[in-house]
Structures are given as structure tokens and as C-alpha cells.
Amino acid sequence: MSEKPTIQQYKQNIQDEDFKAYRCTSCGAIVAPPGACYSCGGTEMEWAEVSGKGTLIAFTVIHVAADEFQPEAPYFVAIVELAEGTRVSARLKGFDPLKPEEVPLGIPVILAYEEAKTGRNYLAFKPA
Ligand SMILES: [Zn+2]
């Protein structure tokens, strides 16, 4: 794909349930937008297909959200390390936000999407 990644297209891909990360064209590192390559500092990116596999690194439960998200609270915001090596922030499915103590860290997760009450799709992961 020769098209240069943009954050707008990145978000649109999530709406379309077609998540892609960035690949640094200098060193090949897979990078989650926005931003420069954490490996070499490069800023030239191309789209990178990813496996959708990852590891749950951390999470928090959002109880009080900005107005537009408040109808969805409480919800998880997780940090997932993709198998390709970069970390993304995403929703977490398959657990009860009111029982965060039941969520084991370090478990394998796979890409999912969560359709919010607003009709908007979010990047999400669920237990593999
Ligand atoms: Zn790089």
C-alpha cells in the first residue's frame, strides 16, 4: 500500500473494523500512531497489517468519562502489547468493569471491536 498513513484514516479503519498499525519505513518497527518510531525516531510510516494477537499489559476502569463517553461508563481502557511489538490503548471485552479484580494481567488477547451506544466502533481486545 503506497498510501501514507494518517491519524484520520487510522481512526476510520477502526470504524471499518479494519485495524492497521504503522510500520516505520526506516527500520521496519511496528508503531502505534500517532507519533514517531520509538526504535529509530523515524517519522516516515506505511500501513502495517497486524495479527491482532497481543498481551494484556495494564488496564484501568473509567467510571467518570468526558461527556460524550459518560453513557458508556464504566468501561475498561487497556494497554495491549501487540505481538508485533508496539503497545496500543483499547477497550477490553469479556470482563465486568465492576469486577476489575477478576481481570488477569499478562493474558493473551485478540483483536475485537466494540460498538458503543453511540454507534461508534472502538478498538478492543478480548481474551484469546
Ligand atoms: Zn524506525
Image (tube, grey):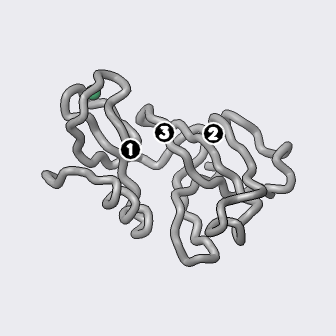
Classify 10 Å Cα crowding around label 3: few (below 14), some (14-19), many (20 and above).
Answer: many
Mark 1 residue type: Pro
Tell me, yes or no, whether the two marked residues, 1 and 3, touch with CB atoms within 8 Å.
no
What percent of the width, then of the height, locates residue 88?
50, 43
Mark 2 → mark 3, Cα distance in angstroms? 9 Å
Q: Position of residue 124 (x, y in %)?
A: 57, 56
Determine the image quadrant of residue 66: bottom right
- Of tags 1 and 2, which is closer to the observer? 1
Quarter-of-image position of residue 10: bottom left
Secondary structure type for disc 1: loop
Earlier-in-chain disc, 1 versus 2: 1
Q: Are marks 1 and 2 in contact (CB under 8 Å)?
A: no
Q: In this view, does 18 lie above or below 22?
A: below
Residue most extreme to the front: 67
Q: How far apart are marks 1 and 3 (CA)?
A: 13 Å
Write down the residue under mark 3: 82
| Residue depicted at x 20% and y 34% | 25
Q: In which quarter of the image is residue 9?
A: bottom left
Q: Residue at 25% across / 29% down in the picture? A: 42
User: Which element type, helix, strand or loop, lies under badge 2?
Assistant: strand
Q: What residue type is labelled 3?
A: Leu
The numbered mark, 1 or 3, whose residue comes first in the sequence reads 1
Q: Name the residue under label 2.
A: 56
Q: Residue at coordinates 69% horizontally, 59% vertically from top-left?
A: 65
Q: What residue type is labelled 2?
A: Leu
Q: Which residue is drawn at 73% across and 53% down?
A: 62
Answer with mark 2 or mark 3, whichever residue precedes in sequence. 2
Horizontal arrangement in the rendering, residue 60 relative to residue 15 (left or right) = right
Near-viewer residue (118 or 104): 118
Rounded to the nearest whole Å, what is the CA distance between mark 1 and mark 2? 19 Å
> What residue sits right under mark 1 in the picture?
33
